[in-house]
């Protein structure tokens, strides 16, 4: 079998198909590059020997570039080989993402981590640059590596730490100043929190008995169909913070949420964790996370 000719034929057909059917060129690229990756691995003598067969890839790259033009550098052919090796076991390849997205994804060695970023890219329609930034910020690690499926669970929505952009990261912020920084960059904050968050209000006024209280931020998560109460604390997490947010959650459940909404979630964003307190928190819908200014 002449593997080079087979690879060349796949690539030529792909180029022709893309010119005829522009709307599905992503899918065509992915199918073609997966097949090229398979042929390269086979030509190199199988998976175990593939990583040592870079001389063959160099030879193919030179010939393809000469005969078909740009786009078939050694690095690109290596990516196609890696693409096949990573997705050959049945992981879903989505035509909603481009080859450039997958070129970033296949660099991630952990399969669950790669699946997480693939899910995010599709769900949030991330550009390649945005995907690269999320990987660089170690987003997966900041949700505690709890992903068992591509779709995040409710207890993995919140990252830890949450990164908050400020003008001077060494400046000591008051709670009011922290609140204002977030409010001024609310879109960035919602994206940093996780998937599916929408802004519902800031300093939301509620009446508890004869006194008024103010919820720092009230959000809604459209994936889990629930309101999310956010409370900011610039110090270590304390037991009274749990009591405070519990009251706010109960208020929202009773007076704001509708019967078709899921139970409200509470998130305390604090400067320092206290795992002992969280161990004795009986409400599974209350979470705590630290913040870090950048």
Image (cartoon, helix red, strand yellow):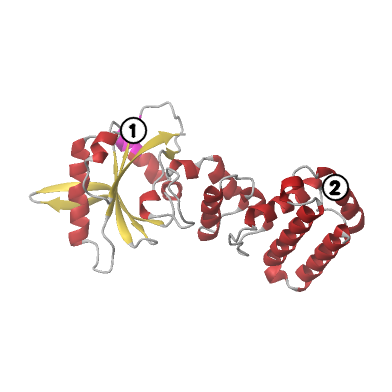
Would you place residue 257 above or below residue 52 in this image?
below
Please name whichever residue, 57 or 212, is drawn nearer the observer in this view of the structure.
57
Q: Secondary structure at mark 1?
A: loop
Can you give x and y, in whole percent of width and height, for residue 163 in the image? Answer: 44, 39
Q: Which residues are magenta?
A: 173-178
Q: Which residue is mark 2?
A: 56
Counting from the top left corner in percent of width and height, residue 213 is at: 18, 47
Check residue 174 for magenta coloring. yes
Q: Which residue is mark 1?
A: 271
Label whose residue precedes the other's in the sequence (2 or 1): 2
Task: From the top left corner, tell me how far across and down residue 187 is, in percent.
Answer: 44, 50
The secondary structure type at the circle numbered 2 is: helix
The residue at the point 63 percent across, 57 percent down is: 87
Question: Residue visible at 30% across and 57% down?
Answer: 227
Q: Which residue is drawn at the image coordinates 79% and 54% (left, top)?
A: 40
Label 1 neighbourhood size at 10 Å, few (<14), some (14-19), many (20+)?
Answer: some
Q: CA distance from mark 2 to mark 1?
A: 54 Å
Q: Main secondary structure of the magenta part?
A: helix
Label 2 or label 1, whichever lies nearer to me, is 2
Question: Going by the image, does 210 lie left or right of 116?
Answer: left
């Amino acid at each position: 079998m002449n593997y080079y000719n087979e690879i060349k034929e796949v690539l030529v057909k792909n180029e022709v198909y893309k010119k005829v059917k522009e709307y599905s060129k992503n899918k065509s690229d992915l199918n073609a590059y997966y097949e090229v990756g398979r042929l390269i691995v086979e030509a190199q003598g199988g998976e175990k020997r593939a990583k040592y067969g870079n001389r063959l890839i160099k030879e193919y790259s030179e010939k393809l570039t000469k005969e078909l033009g740009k786009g078939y550098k050694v690095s690109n052919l290596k990516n196609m080989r890696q693409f096949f090796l990573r997705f050959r076991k049945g992981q879903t390849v989505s035509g909603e993402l481009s080859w450039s997205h997958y070129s970033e994804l296949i660099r991630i060695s952990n399969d669950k981590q790669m699946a997480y970023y693939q899910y995010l890219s599709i769900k949030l329609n991330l550009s390649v640059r945005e995907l690269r930034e999320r990987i660089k910020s170690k987003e997966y690690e900041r949700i505690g590596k709890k992903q068992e499926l591509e779709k995040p669970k409710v207890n993995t929505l919140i990252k830890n730490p949450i990164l908050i952009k400020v003008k001077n990261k060494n400046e000591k912020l008051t709670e009011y100043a922290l609140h204002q920084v977030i409010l001024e960059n609310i879109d960035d904050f919602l994206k940093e929190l996780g998937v599916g968050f929408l802004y519902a209000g800031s300093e939301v006024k509620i009446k508890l008995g004869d006194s008024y209280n103010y919820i720092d931020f009230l959000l809604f998560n459209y994936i889990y169909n629930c309101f999310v109460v956010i409370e900011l604390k610039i110090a270590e997490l304390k037991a009274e913070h749990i009591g405070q947010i519990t009251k706010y959650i109960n208020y929202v459940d009773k007076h704001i949420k509708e019967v078709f909404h899921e139970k409200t979630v509470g998130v305390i964003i604090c400067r320092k964790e206290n795992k002992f307190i969280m161990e004795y928190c009986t409400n599974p819908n209350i979470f705590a996370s630290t913040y870090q200014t950048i």
